[in-house]
Amino acid sequence: MTTASDVPRSGQSDAEAMIAEAKKAFWVMVGVLVVLWLIQIYNAVDGYSLMYEYGTRAREISSLPTVLTAPLLHASWGHIEFNSGPLFIFGFLAAYRGVKKFLSVTVLIAVLSGLGAWTLHDSGTVGVGASGLVMGYFGYVLVRGIFDRHKIDIVIGLVMALCFAYQFAGLFPQDARVSWQAHLFGFLGGLIGGWVFRDRRPKPEVTAPAFPTIPLTPPDTPK
C-alpha cells in the first residue's frame, strides 16, 4: 500500500533537480578552468604565438571568427590568475540553473563581447582574455532572477551587485591595456541573455465567467 509520504512532492523533486544541475555546473566550470590553464601553459611555452594567431585583431575581417577563440587565451600568467576566480564564481552561478542554457548564454556573450572589441579597439591591437565572459556572466546573474521570477535568483543577483560592485568600474575606460569595450559589450550580452533565455511559463487559461440562465417567462407564482 502506498502512503502519502511515499509520493514525491513537487518541491522536493525541483530541489533535487536543481542540486543535480548545480553539480553539473560545478564540474563544467572546473573543466573550463582546466582547459584555459592547459592552453595558457602551451601558449606561454610557445612564446604566446597563439595569442597573435587566435586573438581578436581590431577591424580585420579575417579576424572575425576569433571572437570565439580569444576568450580562451591570456596575455600573461597574471592575466589568467586575475580572471580565473571571478570566472569560476560567476560562471557557476550562471550555470547552476541549467548547463544547456548556460552554453547558449556563453556563445551570445562571447559574440557580443568579441564584436565590441573588434569594432572599438585601437587599430593594430590584439584582444584576448575571458574577462568579457566574466562581465557577461555577472550581468546575466544580476537580471536572471527578475526575468525568470525566481526569488532565490533575485537574492543572488542583489548579493552579487553588492559584493562585486567594483566590477562596474571595468565597464568604463581606465587602463589602456584593459579592454573596457569587451567588458561593456560582454555585460550587455549577459543582460540580453537574461531576457532571451528567460523561463517562458505558459499563460494561465482564462475561462469565461459563468452566467446564470434566466427563463424568458416568469415562474408560476403559488396560489
Image (tube, rainbow, N blue to C red):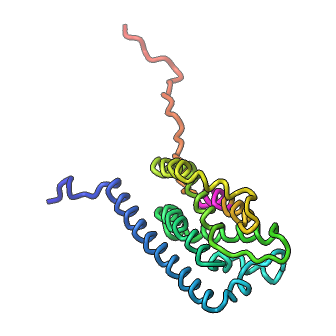
On the image, which quarter does residue 54 sit in?
bottom right
Residues drawn in magenta: 189-197
- Identify the residue at horizontal 84%, vertical 75% (top origin): 59
Residue situated in front as seen by the camera: 215 or 52: 52
Q: x%, y% of residue 208?
A: 54, 38
Quick check: 154 above or below 218?
below
On the image, which quarter does residue 39 sit in?
bottom right
Reply yes or no: does residue 107 show up in magenta. Answer: no
| Residue at the farthest left position | 1
- Identify the residue at horizontal 42%, vertical 65% (top origin): 22
On the image, which quarter does residue 87 sit in?
bottom right
Q: x%, y% of residue 23?
A: 39, 69
| Relative horizontal placement of residue 102, taking residue 195 as reference (left or right) | left
Q: Is residue 112 visible?
A: no
| Relative horizontal placement of residue 24, taking residue 201 as reference (left or right) | left
Q: x%, y% of residue 218?
A: 49, 17
Quadrant for the N terminus in the image: bottom left
Reply yes or no: does residue 193 show up in magenta. Answer: yes
Quadrant for the C terminus in the image: top left
Residue situated in front as seen by the camera: 202 or 15: 15
- Identify the residue at horizontal 45%, vertical 50% (top origin): 152
